[in-house]
Amino acid sequence: MTSSATEVARHASSDDQLIDIWLHGRSPHTQRAYRTDIARLRFGSGKRGAGKPLALLTLPELQEFANSLAYLAPASRYRALSSVKSLLSFGHRIGYLPVDVGRVLRLPAVSNRLAERILPEGDLHRILSLERNTRNRAILTLLYASGVRVSELCGLCWRDLQANGDGGQITVLGKGSVTRSIRIPASVWRLVIGLKPADMDVGDAVFRSRKKKAGGLQPLAVLRIVRAAAQRAGIEAAVSPHWLRHAHASHALDRGAPIHLVQATLGHASINTTGRYLHARPNDSSSRFLPL
């Protein structure tokens, strides 16, 4: 074990401290989700949990816990067990846990249903064209044009927007605290920059809540905007902001965007170097391949 790992292990004197160290630096949303997953293991959360210190957990007990999650949807069960495996691996790696008991636990197979969440171009443009509210249309269009996550969109401040030729560029802080810049077309830039108030401060949120004088929109509010726009367009599926991210990737690739450029624009992990993110090229992004 390295000296840095030894130092971390020295500060993890309990399971609670281990979890805090493991979650350090992750987004609030990710922390909430992972804490829920780990609470199921430790305390049951209404179902049977281990009910014992992590260092004493055995493989049969972990397998029994995995079986007890049958009531969850397949994707939720997969994420819960992935979270548990990640924590146990981390605890062993820093020397807090004597054995990584989760290493041999098999994750359940999850069918890939991504195709069901990719909107055809016609549906997507109907969503955009039928939105009459200026702010909401800018939100919908930027989600699609940039492929940003809803948390990244909600975190945008005016200082994160820079003019670039006829269009502009936004800088977002993504997963793993990785910053990337995304160039957006002129038509989208005009929509977004048109929202700038005369008395704005560079630290103000780009997309502000009407209920809070200076506060930015929260992801739940953006979900409602997207869902209402989809219903207005006659789409019965429960469309979320992430569907517009999927549409960006799919439509850009269909129109000839290089796959590495799509990965860079969306901040996806490289398939060759797990955990690393490619950054958008300063003068290009996959948004230029979209019919905007």
Image (spheres, rainbow, N blue to C red):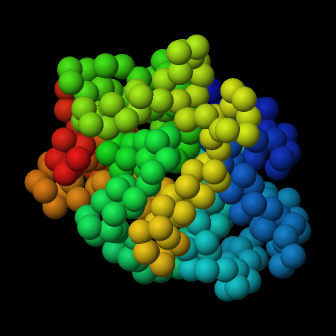
Q: Residue at x 29, y 55 (%)?
A: 249
Q: Residue at x 74, y 35 (%)?
A: 212
Does residue 271 appear to the left or right of 200 in the view shown? Answer: left
Q: Residue at x 45, y 51 (%)?
A: 132
Residue 257 percent across, percent down from the top left = 15, 49
Q: Against 156, is 162 above or below? A: above
Residue 119 percent across, percent down from the top left = 34, 68
Q: Against 66, is 147 above or below? A: above
Residue 130 percent across, percent down from the top left = 40, 59
Q: Residue at x 54, y 63 (%)?
A: 228
Does residue 97 appear to the left or right of 120 in the view shown? Answer: right
Q: Residue furthest front?
A: 132
Q: How many marks?
A: 0
Depth check: give the residue in front, 80 or 88: 80
Q: Quadrant of the N terminus?
A: top right
Quadrant of the rendered structure where residue 103 is?
A: bottom right
Residue 195 percent across, percent down from the top left = 47, 29
Q: Against 164, is 54 above or below? A: below
- Examine the rendering and report whether any part of residue 72 can be seen: yes
Quadrant of the rendered structure where residue 111 is?
A: bottom left
- Examine the rendering and report whether any part of residue 175 can be seen: no
Q: Against 275, is 187 above or below? A: above
Does residue 53 appear to the left or right of 8 in the view shown? Answer: right
